[in-house]
Amino acid sequence: MKRSVNMNSKPLDLVIEGAGCASCVGKIESALNSVEGVHKAEMNFAQRTVQVSGDANAEDLIKAVENAGYNAKPMKAEDDAEFLNEKEEADLAHQKKLFRQMAIALTLGVPLMVYSLVVGEMNVSTTSEQVVWGVVGLATLAVMLTSGRHFYVGAWRSFLNHSANMDTLIALGTGTAWVYSMVIVFAPFLVPEMARHVYFEATAMIIGLINLGLALEVKARGKTSQAIKRLIGLQPKKAVVIRDGKDVDINIEQVLLGDIVRLKPGDKVAVDGEVVDGKTTVDESMLTGEPVPVKKQPGDEVAAGSINKSGSILFKATRVGSETALAQIIEMVKRAQNSKPPIGRLADVISAYFVPVIMIISVVSALVWLNFGPAPAIAYALVSATTVLIIACPCALGLATPMSVMVGVGKAAESGVLIRNGEALQTASKITAMILDKTGTITEGQPALTDLQIVENYSRADVLSLLGSIEQASEHPLAEAIVEAAKAENIELSSVSEFMALSGKGVTGIVDGQKLAFGNQKLMDEFNLDNTLFMSQSDRLAEDAKTPMFFAIDQRVVALAAVSDPIKLDSKAAIERLIQQGTRVVMLTGDNKKTADAVAKKIGIKEVFSEVMPEEKADKVKQLQVEGEIVGMTGDGINDAPALALADVGFAIGTGTDVAMESADVTLMRGSLHGLADAIAVSKATLANIKQNLFGAFIYNVAGVPIAAGLLYPIFGLLLSPVIAGAAMAFSSVTVVTNANRLRLFKPGQH
């Protein structure tokens, strides 16, 4: 079974350090896109990685990131497992650090909060109160310099680079509250007596709660990488190869092309190869989603990462290292997880302007309170300005899309569906019409000769010899069926001259001095060949879902051959799933109308494009697009490539040709059309999840900021506390990440 998944030129992955919120994304991408030679740069804020395609060198890219105020380092593909392990350890250490910082801040903040709620007096009226609150202020400063240090460092770095981010908002909010409170402590006479209230508890509580939210976010974020971790975990570390007639245990990196590898029961296949000795069954479920073990014998291919079940075999290494199907699957999943669907770009645009807008709203809010608010106006102005700064959360916007994409692409990969990019993921969820190529997609793609009717004066052996001789020069699956039938009867084949393949019609050539023509009705019409003798039998065979073809020798039609390609056992059930999902399903084939209608009837398809020439397949895709449909195209052959490329989303069967897979947006690693239904189901679930996240993030900010500014005060007399704002801000990101992780529980369908 062929499973190679060819990739385009490999992009460079960079690990980004210092990106604190979603507003950093646009700046980093802009900096990288401005480097000469960069085609496209896309940052995954959830993973803190950026993928750069083009021919720019790593040094220039890293320098551009540093000039933007951040740090970057390259991540090599061969370090995937090591990188994930290091990242996991680093995330765990960062998580523990955040929890420690939270504990330090809340150790001061909670008692102060309880005191303010129970006693209610946090004013400065006497000298003793100045001393007490001065000590508390210094303790709060210690919290700011320890637990909150990363916020202020991030804000300062952004300031130096003439930008603003979430750290800027937190630093301004907590810093303003602390500075105001210290002014009250050391110079209370500067403000009216009613406004001499200190806000040290707000500063400490905000820092503590936001650190708690960040810690929970890091913890939840780690779960989204489980799919890629499982794929990487399929790669064995060792392999047993035959060297000088002896079994040698070596590292997988040392396996060379052409090495003979021994595979024992229970072992993982180390590299892609071809079985040369022995028989066994192999579990390929983690690669293809197909739960049934596959039988392997000499001549069959085995794929790296699959698990040997029972027998012991020897196989020759045909693809090693980054060329194995598993390595390319991992690379494709990584690329897709880093890519952005169009819906996510809106959040990036908003995030780019988010922080400056929030700062303006904060200043305007303070001015409104100072000019129109009740006494003490300065206190109300401070609270509203601080609360606006603290409650705004660009992180929730930035996480909304990449978190869902990471989980959705990983979930699809678990079902044997490889999605090339975020755009394909989004568009697949909106498909309204699906075109299915018949041969190799709906059917097994392994046709066999079923009928051969011959006129008198010719024997079966004579006809099969001539048919096999001319068809051995053709690459068409139907030609292979004829050649195999001749070989099965031990019939010798002759060489062919002046061979010509007429696309969508048949073949012509000369064998043993006889001019031969073999093909469908179109071929007969083109050469004015009279096939009326076989027309009734041809119609009967077509109605039985067989493909009839006429054979002429020296301008005389002497035989009728019929080839049947078995329908895959689960095609009908998978097509029913597509129809239930609301998809218009259309079958496309080069077969005559009667054969096509017969096949369509068996599998429950009502619309058929029959007698379609290979070059016309793309036209059929365009025809449906003109009708207003969002079209998916599924095929497996070289002649499907133009249609796959033109379709809104192209789906390639993984058992087909590399050309088809390179042209497609989605690759189904198993031959079943259930993978197609799974792909659409996962895409719809992922897009729904993204919309939920974006809606939640937008509503949170759209509703939260006006309330923080004091919108409810004129009506209900309520002004939101900065502490409540800090808690809301901290948990908004956690909510988005948690919702994205719900996708891990999604099941595309039972089949």
Image (cartoon, helix red, strand yellow):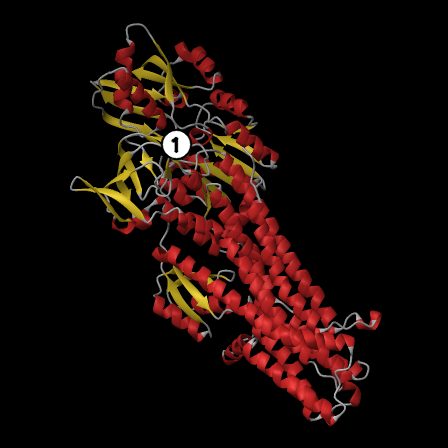
Vertical placement of residue 289 versus 592, above or below: below
Vertical placement of residue 188 versus 499, above or below: below
Residue in the picture at 56% in, 68% down: 99
Graded by Cα atoms within 10 Å as few (under 14), some (14 to 19) or many (20 or more), the crowding at tag 1 reads: some
Residue that badge 1 annotates:
294
Give the left or right position of residue 505, taking residue 606 as reference.
left
**Which quarter of the image is occupied by the N terminus?**
top left
**Which quarter of the image is occupied by the C terminus?**
top right
Q: Quadrant of residue 735?
A: bottom right
Element carrying mark 1:
strand
For the residue pair 458 and 174, the one nearer the viewer reads as: 174
Whether residue 11 is visible to the viewer of this picture, yes or no, is no
Give the left or right position of residue 298, taking residue 404 as reference.
left
Residue in the picture at 46% in, 41% down: 416
Q: Position of residue 396 (x, y in %)?
A: 60, 62
Whether residue 194 is visible to the viewer of this picture, yes or no, is yes
